[in-house]
Image (tube, grey):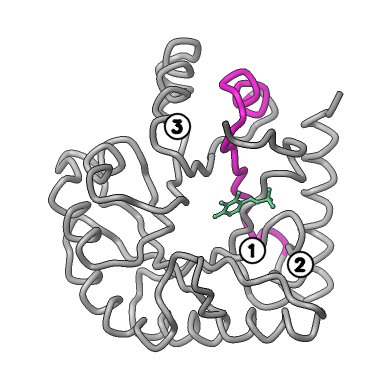
Amino acid sequence: MISIADNLDKVSKSIKKAETDSARPEGSVSLLPVSKTQSAETLTAAIELGLDCFGENYLNEALAKQNALQECLSEQAYQALVWHFIGPIQSNKTRAIAEHFDWVQSLDRIKIAKRLNEQRPTQRQPLAVCIQVNVDDEATKSGISLTELDALAEQVAELPNLQLRGLMAIPAAKASAEQQAQSFARMQQAFKQLKAQYPSVDTLSMGMSGDMALAIAHGSTMVRVGTALFGARAPKA
Ligand SMILES: *Cc1c(COP(=O)(O)O)cnc(C)c1O
């Protein structure tokens, strides 16, 4: 039986330790619980522990859980939740994403950005977006290469219903910590440059269950953690 409370305690301590070890202020790194494949009951348990944001990869699964939570939480508790879309985006899914999420971290095409911008309900805050960077140029991974970043950022920054908040990356697993660190360092540099150009940029989303500390040492401001909080995921059917 896994205990989310125990896991949360461990993850929070690891984040705090990594902040201290890299001489960063306490609280400079936020935790995004990644709840893909987890049940609405698991999310409810996480909410009871004080977690209030969730990263989801699959639209239909996320919408079903949002509906379930809306049924069982008070209006106020439900409204306080912040939803991050972190999976690949198909263009026929943009409307529902624009309507039901607060953040999109997996933006990597101007076509998708324009659709999200058009479809974001105007009575809501602009949709917070991170551009996903494929920092190791892996054929199988989503995201743009760093050389394409300036051009996409410039176009995204002009869309009024989106707010450019930063970058997201999932670096490739490497043979050594030194090699892994190089990918994180490239992201840190790109983030620094982007931040200098756009005042709305404040988020470098990198680091997951297995590489949080190294990501934090390289300036991550948000770690996306699934397994270390909720346990191993069942294979997706
Ligand atoms: C699943 C996922 C995570 C969480 O991964 P863990 O290794 O379980 O912590 C983080 N980011 C993205 C984009 C994911 O798809």
Q: Could you tell me which secondary element the residue under label 1 belongs to?
A: loop
Q: Give the mark toward the camera: 2 or 3.
A: 3
What is the number of the mark on residue 19? 2
Under mark 1, the amino acid is: Ser
Q: Position of residue 161 (x, y in %)?
A: 19, 55
Tell me which segment is drawn in magenta: 26-47
Q: Residues within 10 Å of mark 3 (few under 14, many from 20)?
A: many
Q: Is mark 2 within 8 Å of ligand 1?
A: no
- Figure quadrant of the C terminus: top right
Q: CA distance from mark 2 to mark 1?
A: 8 Å
Q: Residues within 10 Å of mark 2 (few under 14, many from 20)?
A: many
What is the number of the mark on residue 62? 3
Q: Position of residue 212 (x, y in %)?
A: 73, 62
Under mark 3, the amino acid is: Ala
- Figure quadrant of the N terminus: top right
Q: Give the mark toward the camera: 3 or 1.
A: 3
Which of the two discs, 2 and 3, labels the residue nearer the N terminus?
A: 2
Q: Residue at x 17, y 39 (%)?
A: 123
Under mark 2, the amino acid is: Glu
Q: Quadrant of residue 34?
A: top right
